[in-house]
Structures are given as C-alpha cells and as structure tokens.
Image: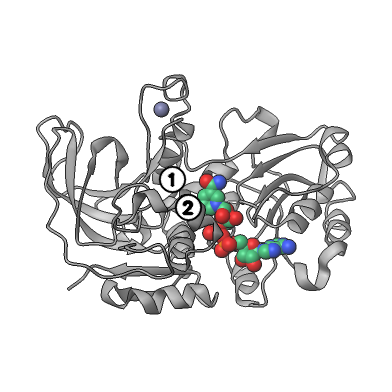
Amino acid sequence: MKTKEEKGFEIKEVPEPEITHANEVKIKVDVASICGTDHHMWDYDQWAQRRLPPAIPFIAGHELGGEVVEIGTDVKNLQIGDKVSLECHEACGTCYQCRSDRMHICRYTKIFGVDKDGIFTNFTVVPELNLVKNDANLDPALASLQDPLGNAIHTVFPKGLTEDEGIAGKNVFITGCGPIGLMAIPVVKTFGAAQVFASGGGRNMSRLEMAKELGAEMVLNAREEGEKIPKIVKDATDGNGVDILLEMSGNVHALRQGLESLTLGGRVSLLGFFPGPIEFDINSLVVSKGISVYGIAGRRMFETWQVMGGILKSKNFQNHLKKLITNRVNMSDWEKGMLEIHEKRAIKVVMDPFK
Ligand code: NAD
Ligand code: ZN
C-alpha cells in the first residue's frame, strides 16, 4: 500500500473486500506485475507528488491476471472460474467522450492502484466493465502484461487510422526500448511490418539485445549514434525514411530523431510522457512534412483488448512476450522486484500473491 507522502510502500493487513454493488465481481489475484507507474509512486518522484496525495492510503498495482470467485447479481458476461485481466481506467460512461466512442479518454477517468485501491493484494472487487475475459489456458503471468501490451497495441492502431497508415509492408521506427517499446516490436512484426528500427537510450545494452531478439531488423544506440540516427534510418529505407514512428521513450531527442527519420506524409503515434514541456522545430518536422500525429492514452475500450485477445492466441507471440518477464517474486518480496526496476536491470517483474 501507499500509506505516506514519501518514498516507499508498506505491507498492511486489510479486510477481504466484499461485493457491495450488483455490477461488481470479486477476483482472486493469480499474478500482478509491476508497472512504471507503480515505480513512480513508490519512488514518490515529481509525477507522483503531483498526482498522488488525495488518494493515500490505497492499495497499489493494476496489472492483473486473476480469476473470478464471486459475481454480483447484475453481472452478465462473467462466471465464477473465468480468468480475467483488468482494464485499469475506470470511465464514467456518461460524459461526452464516453458517449462518443472515446471511453479511453473519459473526462472523469479513475485509475485502479492510483486513484482507488489496486491489485497488489490477494482479492479485489471491481466492476464487470473493467474486466476482460482471457482464454482459460493463457498463462496468468502473460495475462497480467496486457495493460502495457495494450498500450503498445493502441499506439500501433490508434482510433481513426487511415487506410494508408496501417502496418503491413511498412517501415516502422520505435523510439524507446522500455517494456512497452519492446512489446511493440513483435506486435508490428505480427501485423507484417517490413523493417523495424528500434532505438534505446540507457546504459544497459540488454534492452537493445532484447529488441533484436524480438525481431527488430536494426537497433540503434541513442547514446552512441545520437544525431546520426535519422541518416542511418534513411540510408536503410532508400532515402525515404520510415512510414511510421511509434514514440515510446518520452525523451525529446528521441522524438526529434524519430520525426527526422519519418518520411514526408508519414504517421507518428505519441505514447511516451515527457518530463515536462518540450521544444522542437514543429514547422519543419510536423507542419511542412504533412505528417499525421496521434496522441495515445491508455488502451481503447475495448477495441484494443479485442486485438490483444487475438494476437495472444499465437504461441509464437506468447514466447516473445515471455522473454520480457525477467524477474518473478512473491508479493512479500515486492521490494526486491521494485529495486530491480529502479536499477533498470529488470524489464518486467511479475509477482505471485501473498502466501
Ligand atoms: P520506460 O521508461 O521503461 O521506457 C522508456 C525507454 O526509453 C527507456 O528504456 C529509456 O532508456 C529509453 N530512452 C531514453 N532516452 C532515449 C533516447 N534518446 N532514444 C531512445 N530511447 C530512449 O517506459 P515504458 O514503461 O516502456 O513506457 C514508455 C513510455 O510511455 C514512458 O514515457 C511512459 O511514461 C509512457 N506511458 C504512456 C502511457 C499512455 O497512456 N500514454 C501509458 C503507459 C506508459
Ligand atoms: Zn466519461
């Protein structure tokens, strides 16, 4: 739990939650994985300080693989024993956005494990609408990765994409090889990308090696290649540049290098959160280039989950996803996992519930 306005989490005994509304479902947590957001909150960095205080104390965590153990009287599409994952954005259902097929950007979005209790616990109760049923035989550890995988898939397929902005046969540049950037590699390969370029910025080379293993044709070390990246990418694409840029780093240099590597009239999807306002030459890199820009928030509710359910049927895709689980701990050892993330040694840490 986040209990104090300072660095850290605490383990606390809490009463087992009960269904109090007819539309709710009680879930036994099989696996919970740690998200970058959980790390921000644990670290109590600037983002967390701006975002958190009103909700404290609360149970952290939102990346879930679980099982239905009880259902409210109005629950329609889930049954006891069903395997589920959590869409962590709770939408109001009545605002302008919710009523015009944009529930993922609901004006009143609440996030489980940030604005209200999350899932770093053994049992949780959530509305049916926030649960997505998984294939019964999907490994719960992989099921718990659908929150970030859904971010990757949404970045690849935003709402309103035009016919010529699809993936098949296109050259794609992914800036940022964090968990989400890495997940995007097998996603775009699955959908028939021609060449995938992936850039990484950290000191730790293992993420770039992982990018290669996941199918990227060319990996670029931003520390070493830096400003040469656009030329390298253009040389490898007949001088044209890539058709699609997926910005998944939240780093302004990566954004600039990505936009410089993009072909005239290309498309960029922006997922990364920058530390604050940024400066780049929007005239030459966006306006005059005639590119399309898509801002990506969360996962489309629930089109992204439909695509994800399909892609996860592939054993080959599952094998790629498995490689990203670098650490597995019990929840009582959460701190070990958190430190591995903090030191950037881990890619994804999954946790088994308290024994
Ligand atoms: P992450 O921070 O683990 O990954 C970012 C990666 O970018 C890191 O590996 C870092 O080394 C790399 N990087 C830094 N500078 C770079 C550079 N100059 N060139 C290339 N790579 C560089 O984060 P993540 O969990 O994979 O998430 C990716 C981004 O998406 C983050 O900014 C995160 O805050 C954001 N995010 C957005 C949403 C949303 O709804 N829009 C949801 C989840 C995460
Ligand atoms: Zn709404």
Q: Amino acid at mark 2?
A: Leu
Dot 2 corresponds to which residue?
Answer: 149
Q: CA distance from mark 2 to mark 1?
A: 8 Å
- Looking at the image, residue 207 lies above or below residue 177: below
The quadrant holding residue 292 is top right
Few, some or many C-alpha atoms within 10 Å of disc 1 (few <14, some 14-19, many ≥20)?
some
Q: Nearer the viewer, mark 2 or mark 1?
A: 2
The one of 171 and 97 positioned closer to us in this rendering: 97
Q: How is the image coloured?
A: one colour
**Image quarter hosting the C terminus:** bottom left
N-terminal-most mark, 2 or 1: 2
Which residue was labeled with disc 1? 308
Quadrant housing residue 30: bottom left
239 lies left or right of 136: right
At 58% across and 44% down in the image, what residue appears?
A: 155
**Quarter-of-image position of residue 41:** bottom left
| Residue 275 point in image, percent of width and height | 64, 55
Q: Label 1 is placed on what type of residue?
A: Met
Q: Secondary structure at mark 2?
A: helix
Horizontal and vertical percent position of residue 46 = 55, 59
Q: Are marks 2 and 1 in contact (CB under 8 Å)?
A: yes
212 lies left or right of 292: left
